[in-house]
Amino acid sequence: MTHTCNEPFGPLYQRPPSAPCPNCPCCTANLCEKGRNSVMQCHGQRLADSRMVALVASCPCSADTTRGTHAWRVAQTRAVKHATEQPLPKAAEWVLRALAGGESFEDPTEELHGLRARRYADGDENAWRITQLGRRYLLALEEPRYTSAVHVNSVDVKTRAAKVVVLGWHMEREVTVLADFLAQAVNVELPDLPGRYLDAKANLGAADPDDLVLTRIQMPAPITDDYVAVRPLGGAR
Ligand SMILES: [Zn+2]
């Protein structure tokens, strides 16, 4: 056997070796850099030793509860789409609201287990809590969402992140979104996204760009035949 057996926590499970991550006890800095920018998080990266999956499985650096990670963006989008497109039954929403308000409540239909499966609540019979994701779901039920033009400034194909400008929110500030969400919605390859205008629904009241969640992403409505027909006349004038 190699000496890796004696150093299960060492830097050998990720090659080439890199410095330990300053923000977690489990990973190299290199691994967390990849994990943050991947929906697969740290444990889904290519690890030299598969036994390390369990070790890095709960790495906070790439977790979907850590603001700014790819996994976090996926979770935010999932909660907002859930709230705006196919919301929870009223009984479950009522329980979640009671949790959010710190009120005592009964749960005759056992909604809490479903809420926990969705990661909107955690805990157990002794102490249930609403999660940040659960609060995001409730917020999404109420926050206004508007259609806005979205300009794709750039795409990092390696990290699959896109920098976009959501024109209804700010004319210049860039917003980071997952390029795959854009690409899949409009059926375009990642390298073909930059320079395009898309339409999307967004919570334009958000203060922080990371809190903007785009849904209903689509190509802008095509220019109608009428408009095309009028242009040559205008030009001939
Ligand atoms: Zn990590």
Image (cartoon, rainbow, N blue to C red):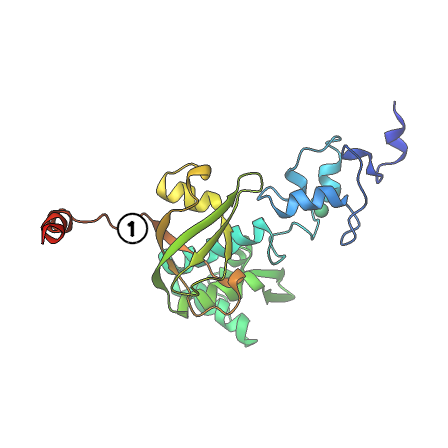
Q: Position of residue 213 (x, y in %)?
A: 46, 58
Rendered view: 228 above or below 166:
above
Q: Position of residue 49 (x, y in %)?
A: 75, 31
Q: Position of residue 111 (x, y in %)?
A: 49, 60
Q: Residue at x 77, y 33 (%)?
A: 16
Instruction: Between residue 116 and residue 150, name the one nearer to us.
Output: 150
| Residue 66 visible in the current orientation | yes
Q: Is residue 74 left or right of residue 128?
A: left
Q: Position of residue 14 (x, y in %)?
A: 76, 35
Q: Is residue 141 left or right of residue 221?
A: right
For the N terminus, the quadrant is top right
Picture quadrant where residue 127 is located: bottom right
Instruction: Between residue 209 and residue 41, name the one nearer to us.
Output: 209
Instruction: Between residue 34 and residue 2, name the one nearer to us.
Output: 34
In the rendered picture of this protein, how many numbered marks are placed on residues?
A: 1
Identify which amino acid the numbered label 1 is placed on. Pro
Residue receiving disc 1: 220
Q: Secondary structure at mark 1?
A: loop
Picture quadrant where residue 42 is located: top right
Q: Residue at x 75, y 42 (%)?
A: 55
Rendered view: 22 above or below 112:
above
Q: Residue at x 53, y 53 (%)?
A: 73
In the image, the residue with mark 1 has its CB under 8 Å from the nearest atom of ligand 1: no
**Residue placed farthest to the front in the image?**
237
Q: Quick one: label 1, few (<14), some, or many (20+) residues within 10 Å?
A: some
Q: Residue at x 57, y 64 (%)?
A: 132
| Residue 114 visible in the current orientation | no
For the C terminus, the quadrant is bottom left
